[in-house]
Amino acid sequence: TFVVPTAKTSQCGSSQGTGETNLQQIQEQIGELQSKYQELSQQKVVLEERLSAVEDNISNKTLSGAAATGYLPSSCSEVAERSGFEDQGYYVIDVDGPDRGLMPMIVQCSIQDQTAITLI
């Protein structure tokens, strides 16, 4: 929280009204910035909640198949075989298999004409 004193200011060689006008403008700008900060803080909380829900959803869908086989699926086709998904969603896959060069990644899986499609 910002606090600006409301004391009168005077500048050498200028009228006292100009200093007061500048101070009022600065106070208004500070008020606007405080308002924007509060709005952004609220948006941050909402986005963190949404991200947490997405992460939980990804974890639940992917880990159920990984627990059965001991490793992450390597494609959306494998995700579909394991879990039988029928619409699109986000999953963690390991395209080159466990303990190899590429790290597991989050992908979007979709079904088109009875075929599982991996969207990176």
Image (spheres, rainbow, N blue to C red):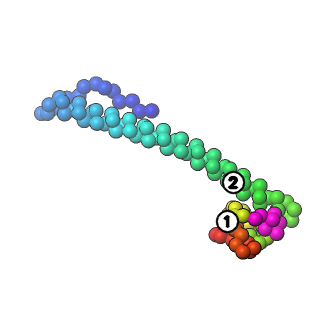
Quick check: 19 left or right of 5? left
Q: Are marks 2 and 1 in contact (CB under 8 Å)?
A: no
Whether residue 30 is visible to the viewer of this picture, yes or no, is: yes
Residue marked by disc 2: 55
Nearest the viewer among 37 and 78 is 78
Q: Residues within 10 Å of mark 1 (few under 14, many from 20)?
A: some
Which residues, given as a range, are shown in magenta? Answer: 80-86
Q: Is residue 81 magenta?
A: yes
Q: Amino acid at mark 1?
A: Gln
Quickly name the residue at label 1: 108
Crowding near the residue tagged with mark 2, few <14, some 14–19, many ≥20 C-alpha atoms within 10 Å = some
Q: Quadrant of residue 25?
A: top left
Q: Residue at x 28, y 24 (%)?
A: 7
Closer to the camera: disc 2 or disc 1? Answer: 1
- In the image, is 18 to the left or to the right of 54? left
The C terminus: image quadrant: bottom right
Residue in the image at 69% along x and 61% along y: 90
Q: Provide residue 4's location: percent of width, then percent of height.
A: 35, 30
Residue in the image at 69% along x and 68% along y = 110
Amino acid on which the number 2 mark rests in the picture: Glu
Q: Is residue 108 above or below residue 58?
A: below
Which SS class for mark 2? helix
Of the two numbered discs 2 and 1 on the same chain, state the one appearing first in sequence: 2
Q: Give the quadrant of residue 17.
A: top left
Image coordinates of residue 12 in percent, x first then y, are 15, 32
